[in-house]
Image: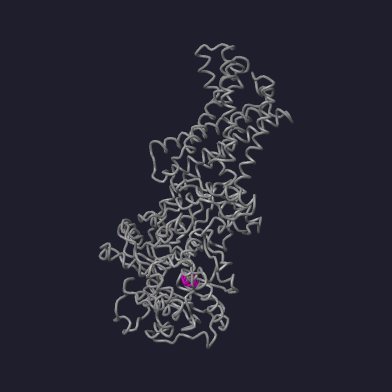
Amino acid sequence: MTVAPPAKSSKQAVVVATYATLAAVPIVAAALILAVGTDLGDAGREVMWNIAEWARFLLYASAAVLVIVIAYGYYRRYELWRLGKPESRTDNWAERLKAFLIYGIGQGRLPGDLYASVMHLFIFWGWVVLFIGTAMLTIHDDFYHYLTGTTYLGYSLTLDIFGLLALIGVGMALVRRYLMRPPKLRLASLWDDAVLLWLMLAILVSGFLVEGVRIAATELEENPDWAGWSPVGWVIAKVFTEAGAGTGLLQDIHQAFWWFHIPAALAWIAWVGYGKVAHIVLGSANIFTRRLSPTGAQIASAALQPITDFKNPGVARLQDLTWKQLMQVDVCVRCGRCEGDCPADLNGSHLTPMGLIQDIHNYMSEVGPRLVAAQRKDGQEAVAGERTIAGDLIPADVIWDCFTCGACEAQCPFFVEHLSFMVGLRRRLVDEGTLDTQLSDTLMGLSRYGNSLGQSEKLRGRWTEGLDFPVKDVRQEPAEYLWFVGDQASYNPAAQEVTRAVARVFNKAGLDFGIMYEGEKSAGNDVRRVGEEGLFELLAEDNIQTLGECQFQTIVTTDPHTFNALKNEYPAYGGQYRICHYTELLADLLENGKLKPARRLNHRVTYHDPCYLGRYNGVFDTPRRVLKALGVELVEMGRSRERSYCCGAGGGHLWMQETGRGERPSENRIREAVALGGVQYFVVACPKDVSMFQDAVKTTGYEEEIAVRDIVDLVEEALEVEVPEREATGSPRESASAMEV
C-alpha cells in the first residue's frame, strides 16, 4: 500500500524542528561555555544597576499588591462559576497531570496553521524562559548568590536568545493580525487582544534597551569579554557607544527605559488575573480538569451527563450549566481554531462554536455578577435582565445546526467541551417542542418502533433473506460474536447490500456470529445528541435487558454511532461489554490468516474517517490496516484522521430538514476526494456514510470519476466471495433520499 503523506506532515516536521531548536539553545550555551573555559570565572553583574534603593522596595511592594490584584480577579470568576451545578473533575490525578504536561506545558495541540504554530511556540517558550530567568535573578539577588562566572554567561546567552525568539513571535502575531488578517480572528479584534500584543512588544523592546544601555555603560570597555554573551544587548550597546553617548547620558537613558519597562511588565502581570492573558492559568486549570475520555477517545464529550431533573431539563439559565461549563466560557481565547474544521460554520450556517461560547461568556459577564450579589444578599435566584439561554440568547436554528462531529473539541487547545453545551441546549428545546416536524416524527417513530426509519421491528432481520446461509438468533443460541447491526444497516436499502456483504465475509472467515433480530432497538446515540434523553434511556434499558438474555463474548457493530453508544455510554446504565467495530475485526481476521485474499487489489482509493469512529473513539489505524492487507494504494485527504470532515449526518441531521444555506458537508468532502486526482473509490466504514456520500457523488456530478464503496466491498472483492445471483441482480443501492423517515 502506498500512502501519500498527509498535508500536515510538513507542519509536523517544522514544529519538531522548532522544538529541537528551542531545546538546543541551552545546550549550545553550555557547549560554548565549556569551549571558553574558566578564565571568566568573575563574570557577573549588579542587579538593579543605576536604580535607587527605594525603587527596589517599591518594586517588591508592587509585586505584593499584584498578587492580591490577580487573586481577586480569579476570585471574581470563581464566584461566577459557583452559580453552576456541581460536577466531579478531580479523579485520577496522575492522568490529569500527564494531560497537563502534554497539552499545557508541552503545547500538544498547536494550531493547524504552520505559521501560527511557530509563532505561538516562539511567544510561549520565549515568555516562559524569560519568566524563569527573572525568578532566577530574584533568587540570586535576595537569597543565594549563584549567577556568576560561566553560569552567568550561559544564563545571559540563553535569555537573550529566547527573548529574541519571543520578539520574533510577537512580530509574527502583529503581521498576522494587521496584514494577513485570517477570517477567524474577527472576534480577536477586540481592544484587549490588540493592546496585549503591543504591550508585549513594548516589554520585550524596552527590556532589551535596558540591557543594551547597561552593557554600554558597564561592560563594553571594562569587561568586553562578558558583553558578547548577551548578543542582542551587545548590538544595542554598540549602537549607543558609536553614537557617542557618554556615561551620564547612558545612565539617564537607562533609568528612563527602566521606568517604562517595569510598569509595563507589572501591568502585563496584573492582566493575568483579568484579560486574555488569564488563559495562562485558566487554560491550564481547564486542561487539568478536562473530562477524562474512555480509552482511545479523542474528544472530551464521548460520554454525556444524564439528566437529573426531568422536570427542568436542559439549559435555560446560567444555573443550569455546571461549574465546569461556566469555567470553560472564561477559558475561550477567541483563537477561532474550533471554526476551522466545523462543517456547520463552513456550510454557511449561523452556528460558530467560538461564537456560541463567547455569547454565553458575555452574558455571564453581564448578568452573573448581579446573580452572585442577589444570592449573597437574600438568596434570590433571579435578577432583572436574565434571558433564556436556549432559544433566546442562543437562537434555536443555531442550536440545531450542529452536527455533533466533535471537530471543534478536537481542535480547541484548552479542551473546551462545546458538545456538552450543545446537547444541554437541545434538551431544553426538545422539552419545549421547538424542533422541526421531520425530527419530531422520527423521534415518535423511534419511541413506537425502536428504529429511526419508522419500520416494524419484525422487519429488522429481513435483510438476511438475501443470504445463502442462516444467521443465528443470539436470543435462542449462543455465539462468540453478537452483531449489533443498527438501524441504517438493517432497514435502509442503500446500506442493506453492505450489511449482507459483511455477513458473507464473516461467514467466509468461519466466524461464530449472530444477531438479535427484532430484539434489537436503536442504540440511541443520535437520540441522545438531539436532546431526547428520556427516550435514549428507554432504548438503552431495553437493549441492555435483551443483551443480558443473550450468550456471547464480544459485540461487533458496523455503525460507529452504535459503537460509540455501546462502548462509552451504556456502561453508565450497567451495560459493560467487550465491543469492536467491524473494521477492527476485519483487520484481525486478515492478519491472523482467517481471511486470505485471493488477489491483491490495484485500486487507488481514499478513506474517510467517520467522526464517531475516529475522533470519538480513536479508531484510525485498523481500517488502514485492512486496506494495506488488500494491497490498494491509499491516498490520504488533507483532512484525515483527527481532522476528518463530517459527512453531515451526525447529531440527528439525517432526520432533519436541510437548511439549504450552502454546500452540504458530504458534497464538500467528495470534491476534496476528487481533487486528489485519479482516485477511483471513496472508501467508507459507516452505513450512514454509504447513503450520504453516494447521494453527494450524484449531486456533485462526479459519478463518472469516483464511486463510494464500503471497506467490506473491497474485502469481498479481494476474497472473490461468490455473490448469490438473486442479490447480484437486485435493485441498486439507493441514496439517502430513498429512506423512509
734 vs 313, left or right, is left
- Quadrant location of residue 85? bottom right
- Vertically, is 349 above or below 222? below
Residue at position x 59%, y 23% in the image: 259
First to last magenta residue range: 581-588
Residue at position x 74%, y 31% in the image: 143
Which one is nearer the viewer's eye here, 615 or 663? 663
- Vertically, is 225 above or below 390? above
Report x, y in % for residue 632. Answer: 38, 65
Report x, y in % for residue 227. Answer: 59, 21
- Vertically, is 501 above or below 645? below
User: Going by the picture, which residue comes out furthest to the right?
Assistant: 143
* Main secondary-structure element of the magenta-colored stretch: helix
Report x, y in % for residue 379. Answer: 64, 54
Q: Quadrant of the C terminus?
A: bottom left
- Quadrant location of residue 139? top right
Report x, y in % for residue 284. Answer: 59, 47
